[in-house]
Image: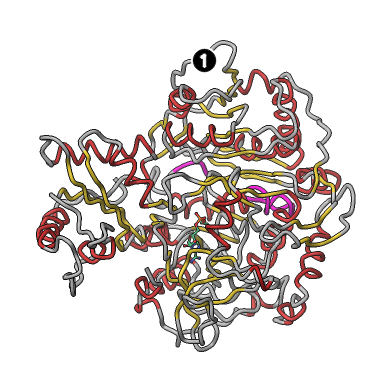
């Protein structure tokens, strides 16, 4: 597949530009583009950024790249990241609010840095009581309650890497991740509130634990008060064990390169991979990008990143980045339409949010709901608007700036990945002239390029593969337990090790326009992006063929006006089972059970055969063309071209009766 397959020409409108408003430029932390030149010595640049961390022992070397692509940053340094996120703030700003938390039903909590510190220490003590030691992996499967950031930090306090599993994932998905990491303890909730309903997290955790043997203790936060089974000897109520702990706990000293966390993400195979992040480099980059990209003035701004902590955006910009800067954040538990479609704007108005960070899929949903909802609220506190997760179409970008940002607020479109740990391509709001739909330029200290199939840099104005040509501090250090896959996935394609040239391939297509602006074009591999969530076609296919009625399945992401991409499946059946509506529902539920609701196909088309090349490869591109109603062109190379018309016809019928994307 080539990046041009994904080129959405409608994305480009190179002519429209927006310079930073004076109100932002005048007080911006970064106010001059000289910073790009200053960062030409990237090691010196990142070393300067690392000065804001609390170190126990200084490091001897900024970067050791001698074992590339396995990087070591701030070699020999000793620290505990929670001393940067908590302890350092206590003396002078212990009473500053760390989180304004708001539950979906409307309950609220204000948590100061001092309170957060005490709670983290208590939970760290509780984890130690159940036998957690430095290096043990802890799985976290929770809703967006205050105990969630506390859980991450308590693990970090002990030097015990966390592995957060998004609460929307299924029991099977949780079990796979626990098994891969061999996690020792699980922290979960009785349930989570979502759109007025209880998501039964504990029940799903129980199902997961039937498929795992490594977990010895489960801590359960009481939130929704739904009935749960507590297994004696294994399950412990969070409030019971935590309330009897002292509110102090010395931080465990870690090496710069000790594991901070694992976060599983979908790749091009059916098995999600555990992305490895370590302590010092990760914290350096998330702390620095908070200031560069969000222009975060920690004493004045109210920052709200709407992402769930189950994703990397939540790790970096709900937990570590804001706290390391001593910032005040909003944390919201639930759905944006609950109790009404103005919930976000109500929160922005009430807490006077100044910097808002959300996803294009949400913005498009808000657009669809109409201007009436933001119109009910005073949003004038907003001064910077961020977006992340997928390419943002210029129309949504303009709506965000105009309707939410009052026509003046800069939009920072941030391109990055679970693997990059922190922003990579993004504007500097006090410096960069933006273009709607473009993430603009690689950040200071970052070196990127757009290359062709042979790895040659393409001229401005052309598209190709997005690559990063220099290491950066928050880069993934590997895939947990699979060095080979790490090299094959990210480094093999464009690196030339014999010349000492290591090039990171992100899996995205990009184009640079004539002014050098980067325009992201979406994934060029078999990874779909549904509402900003990464889902592998193979993962969904293997969930489908796991159902006894399914013989073969092909899955593609087709363009969708709201969710970016929507999952479309094509299935052949075995045996005598009829491909009817009841089976469609059953298969969608089956995928939800295997992976999670986010992976449910929007449409399933039954067919006698899948279109294949003569060598037996499924023609996904053709299926995408069918799904997006494009002209099919030459199909004579197919082994079974006759089936194509039939599939196209069935897809047309299906589309008319398709389930809504978010159902
Ligand atoms: O395809 C890109 C898309 O999301 C992918 C990374 O997904 P994930 O690891 O789940 O992290 C999402 C949040 C950082 C990328 O490979 N992506 C992310 N941000 C953007 C984007 N595509 C275009 N523009 C963005 N701003």
Q: Residue at x 41, y 52 (%)?
A: 342
x, y percent for residue 162:
63, 38
Is residue 257 at least partly visible in the picture?
yes
Q: Nearer the viewer, residue 574 or 86?
A: 574
**Visible residue check, residue 375:** no
Q: Residue at x 52, y 46 (%)?
A: 273
Location of residue 47 with respect to 658 vertically, above or below: below
Which class describes the residues within 10 Å of circle 1: few (<14), some (14-19), or many (20+)?
some
Q: Nearer the viewer, residue 45 or 54?
A: 45
Chain part drawn in magenta: 319-334
Q: Could you tell whether 251 is left or right of 515 in the image?
A: right
Residue identifier under label 1 = 230
Horizontal side of 570 relative to 295 (left or right) equals left
Q: Nearer the viewer, residue 219 or 524?
A: 524
Q: How many numbered marks appear? A: 1
Residue 642 percent coordinates (x, y): 10, 62
Q: Depth check: give the residue in front, 193 or 166.
A: 166
């Amino acid at each position: 597949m080539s990046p041009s397959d994904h080129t959405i020409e409608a994305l480009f409108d190179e002519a429209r530009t927006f310079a930073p408003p004076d109100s932002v430029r005048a007080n911006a932390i970064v106010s001059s583009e000289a910073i790009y030149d200053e960062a030409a010595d990237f090691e010196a640049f990142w070393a300067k950024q690392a000065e804001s961390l609390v170190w126990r022992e200084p490091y001897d070397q900024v970067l050791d790249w001698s074992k590339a692509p396995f990087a070591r940053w701030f070699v020999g340094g000793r620290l505990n990241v929670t001393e940067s996120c908590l302890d350092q703030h206590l003396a002078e700003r212990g009473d500053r609010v760390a989180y304004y938390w708001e539950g979906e039903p409307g309950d609220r909590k204000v948590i100061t840095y001092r309170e957060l510190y005490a709670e983290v220490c208590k939970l760290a003590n509780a984890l130690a009581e159940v036998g957690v030691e430095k290096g043990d992996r802890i799985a976290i499967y929770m809703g967006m309650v205050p105990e969630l950031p506390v859980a991450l930090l308590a693990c970090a306090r002990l030097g015990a890497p966390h592995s957060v599993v998004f609460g929307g994932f299924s029991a099977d998905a949780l079990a796979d991740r626990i098994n891969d990491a061999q996690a020792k303890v699980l922290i979960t909730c009785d349930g989570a509130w979502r759109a007025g309903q209880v998501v039964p997290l504990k029940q799903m955790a129980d199902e997961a634990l039937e498929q795992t043997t490594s977990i010895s203790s489960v801590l359960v936060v009481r939130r929704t008060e739904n009935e749960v089974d507590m297994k004696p000897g294994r399950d412990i109520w969070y409030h019971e064990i935590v309330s009897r702990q002292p509110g102090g706990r010395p931080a465990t000293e870690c090496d710069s390169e000790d594991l901070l966390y694992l976060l599983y993400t979908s790749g091009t195979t059916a098995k999600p991979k555990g992305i490895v992040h370590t302590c010092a480099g990760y914290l350096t980059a998330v702390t620095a990008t908070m200031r560069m990209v969000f222009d975060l003035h920690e004493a004045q701004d109210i920052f709200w990143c709407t992402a769930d902590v189950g994703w990397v955006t939540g790790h970096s910009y709900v937990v570590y980045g804001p706290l390391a800067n001593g910032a005040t954040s909003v944390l919201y538990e639930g759905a944006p339409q609950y109790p009404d479609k103005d919930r976000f704007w109500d929160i922005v108005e009430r807490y006077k949010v100044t910097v808002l960070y959300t996803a294009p899929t949400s913005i498009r949903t808000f657009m669809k709901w109409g201007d009436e909802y933001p119109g009910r609220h005073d949003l004038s506190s907003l001064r910077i608007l961020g977006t992340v997760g997928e390419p943002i179409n210029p129309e949504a970008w303009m709506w965000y700036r105009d309707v939410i940002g009052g026509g003046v607020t800069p939009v920072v479109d941030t391109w990055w990945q679970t693997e990059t740990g922190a922003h990579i391509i993004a504007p500097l709001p006090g410096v960069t002239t933006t273009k709607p739909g473009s993430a603009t330029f690689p950040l200071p200290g970052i070196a990127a390029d757009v290359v062709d199939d042979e790895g040659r840099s393409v001229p401005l104005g052309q598209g190709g593969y997005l690559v990063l040509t220099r290491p950066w501090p928050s880069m993934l250090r590997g895939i947990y337990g699979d060095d080979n896959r790490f090299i094959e996935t990210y480094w093999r394609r464009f690196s030339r090790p014999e010349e000492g040239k290591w090039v990171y391939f992100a899996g995205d297509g990009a184009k640079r326009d004539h002014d050098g602006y980067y325009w992201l074009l979406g994934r060029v591999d078999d990874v779909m992006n549904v509402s900003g969530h990464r889902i592998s076609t193979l993962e969904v296919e293997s969930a489908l063929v796991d159902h006894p009625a399914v013989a073969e399945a092909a899955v593609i992401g087709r363009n969708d006006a709201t969710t970016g991409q929507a999952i479309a499946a094509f299935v052949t059946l075995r045996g005598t089972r009829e491909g009817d509506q009841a089976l469609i529902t059953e298969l969608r539920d089956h995928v939800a059970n295997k992976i999670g609701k986010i992976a449910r196909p929007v449409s399933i088309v039954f067919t006698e055969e899948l279109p294949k090349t003569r060598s037996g490869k499924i023609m996904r591109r053709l299926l995408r063309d069918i799904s997006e109603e494009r002209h099919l062109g030459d199909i004579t190379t197919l082994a079974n071209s006759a089936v194509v018309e039939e599939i196209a016809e069935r897809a047309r019928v299906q589309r008319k009766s398709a389930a809504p994307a978010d159902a």
